[in-house]
Image (tube, coloured by chain):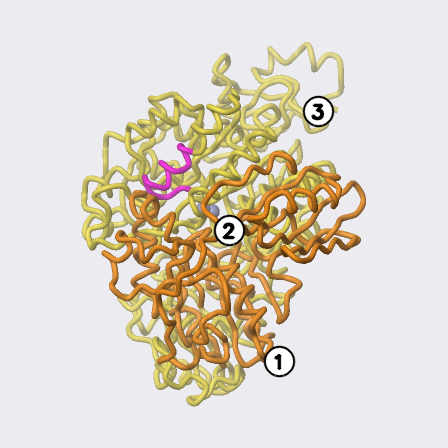
Chain colours: A yellow, B orange
Amino acid sequence: MIEVYVAKNIITMNPSLPEATAIAVRDGEILEVGSLESLSPWLIRDDYQIIETFQDCVIVPGFIDPHLHPAMAAVILPMHFITAMPWTLPWCEVPASLTSHAFDQEMQRISATVDDEILIFWGHHDLWHGTMHRDRLDAIDADRPIVAWNRSFHELHMNAACMAQLGITEASISGRAQIDFEAGRFFENGLAFAIQKLNPYILSDTRFTLGLERLKQVVHAGGHTTIGDLAVGLFDFERELATTVKIFERDDTPFRIEQVPHGAVITHNRSFEETQTLLSNLSSNSSHRLNFRARVKLFSDGAFFSQLAQLLAPGYLDGHVGEWLTAPEVLHEHILNFWRAGYQIHVHVTGDMGVEVALDGLAKAQAEHPRLLHGFTLEHMGYATPEQIERAKGLGASVSANIYYLHELSGRYAELSVGYERASTMGRLKTCFDAGITTALHSDFSMAPAQPLLNMWVAVNRINAQGEQMGAAECLTPEQALAAVTLNAAKILGIETFTGSLRAGKRADLTVLSDNPLTVDPLLIKDIRVVATVFEGSVAPIETA
Amino acid sequence: MIAGYLGAGKTTLINRMLADAVQPFAVIVNDLGALAVDEALIAGQRGTTLSLTNGCACCQISADLAAQLARLRQDDFSALVFEASGVAKASRLAALTSQAEGYALAKVVTLVDGLDAPRLLADAYLSPLIKEQIAAADWVLQTKRSKGVHPSLAALSKDIDQLSSQGRLPAALAPEYCFDQTARLEAGIKAPLFQHRVIFPRPGLAPDVLQTFIADHPEIERVKGWLVGSTDAVLVQATRAHFQARAVARAHGQGLQFIWRGDAELNFSALT
Ligand SMILES: [Zn+2]
Ligand SMILES: [Zn+2]
């Protein structure tokens, strides 16, 4: 039986046939993309069914987010969101709570409806919601443990019942910096103390499983048919393997996960040969939806959100320096080992000095053992100079960028971190496209919302949280941005032979949109609705509130 | 806390502390991202060694460090030595670990390789880190160089002492003295210069080939590590006076650590 999907418009990302109106699918595989007439040689030879559900919609290749972190998301998603910005979560619509009164009302409402052992709210922000205090949480319910976690994750408050439950007394925290017992406030280093106490709850099996179930909904709602778990083992290698198979290898999961192991974790206490054996066993035991391949994730410099990216001169405004997550020489050693073994290497790089060290490693590897089409990828790439992009091109590197940095941080970083020139040119993506580099977009969820259309909107318009356009010369065209969340993202994961575009022979991974992202007003790209996805020929509708 | 860049001698120092310790003490190694040898060399010594494998210690939603610190409190240790990863900023890690319930940070000791210091301090990628590790320390010790504190280090701080690679450790480095903030190393003990290196012998290398190699090189002081065969492994522990090779079911680490006297290179090609 052939299923024929017809649509107002089908954007294929196949340069030889960029647009179409019908697509024939059999057993999850695309037979042909074209029009109803052009498909007829197939249709006269087999039974077929025309699916008209999407005839007023636009079909694009299934979205691919080549870099997010299911395990981290699983920790956060079970929390109750109360935020200043509205969030659309598949299991609930989070309204904008813009005042301290609104925040308290939401706490009250949620507290009346759930019976969590410890009630954890996430999203408190002083600017909107006023100062938090344990008395304020006690006023919500003095008898049940409550935590209010700050939007930044760097601070939380807990009420007296919660401290009692966790065994925190004034004596047990005496003299510790960055804890205010009276206010129930734990911040920065003091937060580590609180987390240590909360870990048994936030990492419990029930919550972790719930978190992954919710992640599944988030990924589907974003319109993805493929995601990359870009550091399996970030949190607990064995547990991640076991739990992800249980949650995701099921018929109701409308996407696949491309698993890229955390290089430092899998080489820890293993010889390189042992590491290779482990990884090739994992690859050959890949299941239908969960796949390891010859890929690895390595880390160069520190976190972008914490201003720990390593910067070339002139550095940060305040003169502080970033951090290495891996010593440069160790990173180079890992690069060389995996390079010789033929792996596709992904390196987390946030600052231009981090990029420099990664490219030095790639240059050494190329000099010793030249490879073509190796897929070496710079991940995130917050700051990079035009010359580095030229060098990356010369060495054959690809780029997978977190463009949401620009939206969320460029306004503040211009004032407080690196000055306007570098803040406005973070995510230098047009330069990458012009250089001919394979360039993709990712969310790094839970660092940014897992919504490819939102990322496309940022890449095309480069508008920051303050509404100002930053670095107009680096805006992508809508076509480039769409390529960055489909075909190019497939290349980043090394799976472009079977997904990422729509053409005969590829798997039928489609995303169905309410409007055409290439022709709508670019400012409205983020408002296009994801109607459904089709994963390997199975339709998975997306309900909207 | 023992801080310092890769190769500064942190593991060697901790091994010496373990060997000298009157009472057992605990060791936590935050060596994620380093090569696998470090922890393997500490394991098997006295005391309890735990290694952190999940993310860096700075990642706060990580059960690892907190859980291990909590677990260690069940055991009866009077002291804990925390080996920071080579790229850790000592100040950040100190701030973080000082929050652990039931622990008090006694001191941060930063080791700097006196031979490698000029290179590290000239390296644009690394010099800010090395300077931070020195600035954040309660006590800075230069390792590997016996001819006085290297001028490039002396220029950074007047308070750098030298750690001899031979003989008894200064009393102030015994864990039971670590709480005594006034205990200080007596600086300037002259000692022959030592080098150490981890090599990876070719699979199936026979122990007697190694024994002959050691006999032929009188400068070798100590060898420790594993020879790996196709199905089994041999744990080697050797000093000048004594060669011990014991078959074990499986290597718990990899590589052979050599410590030798003098500043000349050793040619290991007969073994690799
Ligand atoms: Zn990253
Ligand atoms: Zn990431």
The residue under the point 37% across, 59% down is B142
Q: Amino acid at mark 2?
A: Arg
- Label 3 element class: strand
Position of A6 with respect to A304 (left or right) is right
> Is the distance from the Cβ of mark 1 to the nearest ligand 2 atom less than 8 Å?
no
Sequence-first tag of 1 and 2 = 1
User: In this picture, is B147 found above or below B82?
Assistant: above
Residues at marks 1 and 3 touching, judged by CB atoms closer than 8 Å = no
Q: Which residue is mark 1?
A: B74
User: In this picture, is A490 found above or below A252?
Assistant: above
Q: Which residue is mark 3?
A: A26
| Protein chain holding label 1 | B
Q: Amino acid at mark 1?
A: Gln
Q: Mark 3 or 2, which is nearer the eye?
A: 2
In the image, A354 versus B23, the foreground residue is B23
Q: Residues within 10 Å of mark 2 (few under 14, many from 20)?
A: some
- Label 2 element class: strand
Q: Mark 1 or 3, which is nearer the eye?
A: 1
Q: Amino acid at mark 3?
A: Arg
**Magenta segment includes A359:** yes
- Label 1 element class: helix
- Residue A86 image-quadrant placement: bottom left
The picture places residue B22, in percent across and down from the top left corner, at: 58, 78
Q: Residues within 10 Å of mark 1 (few under 14, many from 20)?
A: few
In the image, A382 versus A525, the foreground residue is A382
- Distance of mark 1 from mark 3, alpha carbons? 61 Å
